[in-house]
Image (cartoon, rainbow, N blue to C red):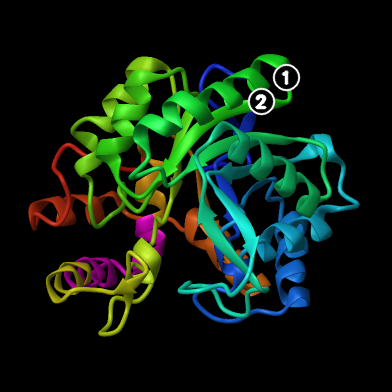
Amino acid sequence: MDLFHTRPIGRTTVQVPRLGLGTAPLGGWPHPITDEEARATVRHAWDAGIRLFDTAPLYGHGIAEVNLGAALRDRPRDEYTLSTKVGRVLEPGPPGETIFHNTPELSSVFDFSAAGARRSLAESLERLGLDRVDICLIHDPDDYHEQALTEVYPVLADLRAQGSIGAIGVGMNYSEPLARFAAEADFDCVLLAGRYTLLEQDSMDELLPLIQEKGMSVIAGGVYNSGLLIDPTPGAMYNYAPAPEHVLVKAGAIRDVCAGFDVPIRAAALQFTLAHPAIATAVVGARTPAEVDDNLAMAALPIPPELWTALKERDLMRPDAPVPD
């Protein structure tokens, strides 16, 4: 697999490589991280050839955007693709309940108004130190479907028409509402987090066929299901919380099949997700340069075709799921 071969996002001119860097870990999830560690990780990703970076105001309540922007400050702007998100604004005050560590004294507040979208994007550009982003996504509008469509979408569509943004989309953790968004507006892409993985493929029922039918693209996030498909042992995280027992059992069974072929489960997880034709790219988080290197190594590791057959024979993945060549 050529990880640096690019594909377009939808029918736009925005190009993305097969593997990008997700920056939630640079905001202090699931463990604290220093600014220098975060910036060193981004610089190392650049040196390793990665040219796609996905971020959001939520990640570290602005910290991930600040560190990403600082690390990319002297890099040629036309040589990389950057996506961020709208739908939350940062307000002064205690961070409140959050999964991120060592956040500044800012709380993350949902705001799916038109003014909120403009403010969110403007503040992201300020933190990043940039004058534009390539992809802008509506972030987690689970309970704000109508407002996101009637207020945020027109703002982003207008910016796209002006050429200020190259591509627009929606990013969520669930496939069913993403399918509604894809059907109801002219988006270029969706970011699907954790719902097309080696562990679960229900998005094949509706979302992924619709994406292909409409000529859109999927940016895959959460390919390791919050870490479960890295090390499925008791206490492993799934959907940002400890994995339920039945989920842990299934992930453990997948791991055991992979081990029989001497393949780390995380290699199978990453390559499986990228094999679906609707998926343009996967953004995978990393906290250290070593984790960047591991992601690249896992994406390139040879995997025998018999592994996929064994998983299907044991009913551990859908029989109709595409697998790597």
Asked if residue 147 is positioned above or below residue 231 in the image, the reply reads: above
| Residue 82 appears in view | no
Q: Amino acid at mark 1?
A: Gly
Q: Secondary structure at mark 1?
A: loop
From the viewer's side, name the closer residue of 316 and 105: 105
Q: Which residues are magenta?
A: 252-269
Percent x, y of residue 195: 30, 49
Q: Amino acid at mark 2?
A: Gly
Percent x, y of residue 87: 52, 44
Q: Which mark is residue 163?
A: 1
Q: Main secondary structure of the magenta part?
A: helix
Residue at point 35% right, 62% down?
Answer: 225
Residue at point 53% right, 36% down?
Answer: 113
Drawn side of residue 74 relative to residue 127, left or right: right
- Residue lying at the far bottom of the rendered structure: 234
Q: Secondary structure at mark 2?
A: strand
- Residue lying at the far left of the rendered structure: 314
- Residue lying at the far right of the rendered structure: 74
Percent x, y of residue 197: 31, 52
User: In the rendered structure, does residue 222 fall within the stretch colored magenta?
Assistant: no
Label 2 crowd (10 A; few <14 / some 14-19 / many >=20): many
From the viewer's side, name the closer residue of 81 and 17: 81
Residue at point 14% right, 50% down?
Answer: 312
Give me the C-alpha separation between circle 2 and circle 1.
Answer: 6 Å
User: In the rendered structure, does residue 267 fall within the stretch colored magenta?
Assistant: yes
The residue labelled by disc 2 is: 166
Label 1 crowd (10 A; few <14 / some 14-19 / many >=20): few
